[in-house]
Image: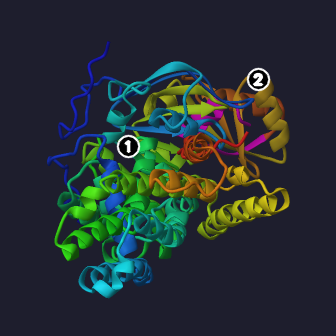
């Protein structure tokens, strides 16, 4: 009997219901990234500010002469602002190739020939980036709160600043959603992950520089809408109940963030297809 | 309304009912009409989708997968409507695309197991099936190698493996022997034939290579310029209603060709001075001899041959 006659059997086992394939994509994506030493180094580095802040909280809680280090609501805002640097690097490292590599290898037609929709594919890819970004924003910020409670030995701080729980959640969500949607949309536009990384960095730096230049010339800070990063900062100030840094109305800052997410969704809808029709 | 074929019954057969049906399907890309009012029925078993490049074969497969939406018409696969049940159909379908395609950064076994999981198999089952199908397609020894290091022939095999891993009831194979060397091609065709005839998997093999279809399929649908030129069982399409003769004459091949064409015979000039003449009915070779004698031409070679799919294909698409 030929070997192939022995090797192939019909399958009679269980099958998952449709709608769960995005979890397979997400798990495989996260596993692949976590297997890379370079990424693990980046992840460790992204947790360094948490350690610094934890030491700050410890010192403030145990040494009265260091009471000036006592954490405030603003401390958490500053912490998340610091993490924006790591959000930038992780977004490029992980996100640039998420769809671009599949486009380069013609993998989209393989994915979409399986029982999963285009949105499920996007959800799976999005989940990879979201999970890793949450692990350097929301997760350490929340842990910092727990550390504060632990070192202080009371719930006084959290009771006095109860708004921090939704504020950290909301701001982290805005931060990671904006980065993830923008990066996935850019990744769907090219077959080269390097080019996607350059495009993303260009978008962040160019819009930021444009705003600073125009602000420098006109002296008008309401033009912060030109830069998604600055619009997000403005939104962050409002969420953490801090004085707003620009004259940009809150609705406009929110409009920039939501608009960019919606525009990215439209790009993904048009680009994530099994067949590329060139007319 | 037709009842859906029972899912994963182990055979994938549908009691003689068509596995795939198209009714008046048209697909338009911009100003280009890729499929023009196509109606066809694919019976269970191995069906060849034959036609020259650009005939609309791949477009038909992509429409059946739900990748492209027809501007008009209705399609049913395994008894399910493509417009409303695309995901259910894809759960029972395997697709081997024409172009090189893989998931980057994975070994062959990880890639095939991953495809199995995407199709709904539990991780342990997907891994076991991945090993099985990789052995089946002849990649057992190379299963831990990164797919990106594979040769063209190996990439064809891995595409077949990922299409098979979830044990589909229906396989779409788009140009399965593309770029393969003769030995690899023969092995691939053996695999396809085995799947269809011994493993109970329904197949649609899209190819522009007539021998591939003749070797692997029982039925054929011939496409040309976005429309179905002819369809039916292979034997029926080959055409029993006539005989084909290989003919060579001395110093007058062109004249003989013109004479036969003028007399209403189908003649295909195959190589140098040999032509294939299709004589309808049971008349045999006598009319050819008579025509040659009447015009003073010497017949040097006349041999009856079985009408091939090539003859049927040439008749169907009107090729010279």
Label 2 resides on the chain identified as B
The residue where tag 1 is placed is: A116
At 56% from the left and 44% from the top, the residue drawn is A254
At 30% from the left and 16% from the top, the residue drawn is B2
In which quadrant is the N terminus of chain A drawn? bottom left
User: Can you say whether B24 is above or below A97 in the image?
Assistant: above
User: Can you say whether A40 is above or below A115 in the image?
Assistant: below
Q: Residue furthest top?
A: B1
C-alpha separation, residue under disc 1 versus residue under disc 2: 58 Å
Where disc 2 sits, the SS reads loop
Q: Which residues are magenta?
A: B298-320
Q: Position of residue B124 (x, y in %)?
A: 18, 61
| Nearer the observer, B286 or B118 | B118
* Residue A125 visible in the shown view: no
User: Can you say whether A153 is above or below A109 in the image?
Assistant: below
Q: Position of residue A103 (x, y in %)?
A: 56, 57
Where disc 1 sits, the SS reads loop
Q: Position of residue A205 (x, y in %)?
A: 69, 66
The residue where tag 2 is placed is: B263
Queried whether the magenta region covers residue A52, the answer comes back as no
| Nearer the observer, A21 or B30 | A21
């Amino acid at each position: 009997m030929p070997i192939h006659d022995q090797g192939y059997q019909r399958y009679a086992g269980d099958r998952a219901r449709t709608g769960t394939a995005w979890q397979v994509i997400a798990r495989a994506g996260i596993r692949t990234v976590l297997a890379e030493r370079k990424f693990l180094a980046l992840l460790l580095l992204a947790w360094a500010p948490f350690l610094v802040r934890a030491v700050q909280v410890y010192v403030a809680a145990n040494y009265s002469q260091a009471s000036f280090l006592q954490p405030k609501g603003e401390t958490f805002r500053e912490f998340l602002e610091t993490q924006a640097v790591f959000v930038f690097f992780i977004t490029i490292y992980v996100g640039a190739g998420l769809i671009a590599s599949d486009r380069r290898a013609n993998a989209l037609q393989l994915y979409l020939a399986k029982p999963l929709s285009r949105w499920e594919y996007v959800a799976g890819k999005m989940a990879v980036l979201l999970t890793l970004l949450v692990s350097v924003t929301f997760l350490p910020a929340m842990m910092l709160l727990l550390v504060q409670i632990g070192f202080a030995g009371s719930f006084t701080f959290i009771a006095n600043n109860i708004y921090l729980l939704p504020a950290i959640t909301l701001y982290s969500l805005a931060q990671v959603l904006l980065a993830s949607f923008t990066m996935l949309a850019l990744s769907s536009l090219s077959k080269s992950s390097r080019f996607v990384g350059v495009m993303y960095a260009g978008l962040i730096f160019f819009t930021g520089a444009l705003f600073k230049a125009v602000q420098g010339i006109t002296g008008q800070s309401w033009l912060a809408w030109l830069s998604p990063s600055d619009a997000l900062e403005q939104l962050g100030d409002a969420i953490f109940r801090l004085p707003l840094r620009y004259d940009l109305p809150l609705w406009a800052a929110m409009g920039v963030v939501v608009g960019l997410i919606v525009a990215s969704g439209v790009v993904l809808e048009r680009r994530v297809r099994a067949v590329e029709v060139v007319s | 309304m037709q009842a859906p074929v029972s899912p994963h019954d182990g055979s994938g057969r549908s009691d003689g009912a068509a596995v795939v049906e198209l009714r008046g399907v048209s697909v338009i890309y911009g100003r280009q009409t890729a499929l023009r009012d196509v109606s066809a029925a694919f019976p269970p078993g191995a069906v060849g989708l034959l036609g020259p490049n650009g005939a609309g074969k791949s477009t038909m497969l992509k429409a059946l997968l739900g990748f492209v939406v027809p501007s008009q018409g209705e399609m049913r696969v395994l008894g399910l409507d493509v417009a409303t049940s695309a995901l259910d159909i894809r759960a029972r379908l395997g697709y081997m695309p024409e172009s090189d395609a893989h998931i980057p950064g994975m070994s062959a076994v990880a890639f095939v197991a991953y495809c199995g999981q995407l199709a709904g198999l539990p991780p342990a089952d997907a891994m076991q099936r991945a090993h099985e199908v990789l052995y089946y397609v002849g990649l057992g020894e190379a299963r831990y190698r990164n797919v990106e290091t594979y040769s063209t022939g190996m990439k064809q095999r891995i595409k077949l493996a990922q299409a098979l891993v979830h044990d589909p009831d229906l396989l779409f194979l788009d140009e399965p022997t593309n770029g393969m060397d003769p030995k690899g091609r023969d092995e691939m065709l053996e695999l396809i034939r085995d799947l269809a005839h011994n493993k109970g998997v329904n197949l649609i093999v899209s190819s522009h290579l007539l021998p591939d279809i003749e070797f692997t399929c029982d039925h054929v649908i011939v496409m040309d310029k976005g429309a179905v030129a002819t369809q039916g069982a292979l034997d029926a399409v080959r055409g029993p209603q006539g005989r084909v003769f290989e003919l060579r004459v001395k110093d007058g091949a062109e004249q003989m060709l013109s004479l036969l064409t003028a007399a209403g015979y189908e003649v295909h000039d195959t190589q140098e001075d040999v032509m294939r003449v299709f004589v309808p009915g049971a008349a045999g070779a006598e009319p050819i001899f008579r025509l040659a004698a009447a015009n003073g031409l010497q017949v040097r070679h006349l041999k009856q041959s079985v009408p091939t799919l090539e003859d049927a294909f040439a008749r169907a698409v009107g090729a010279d």
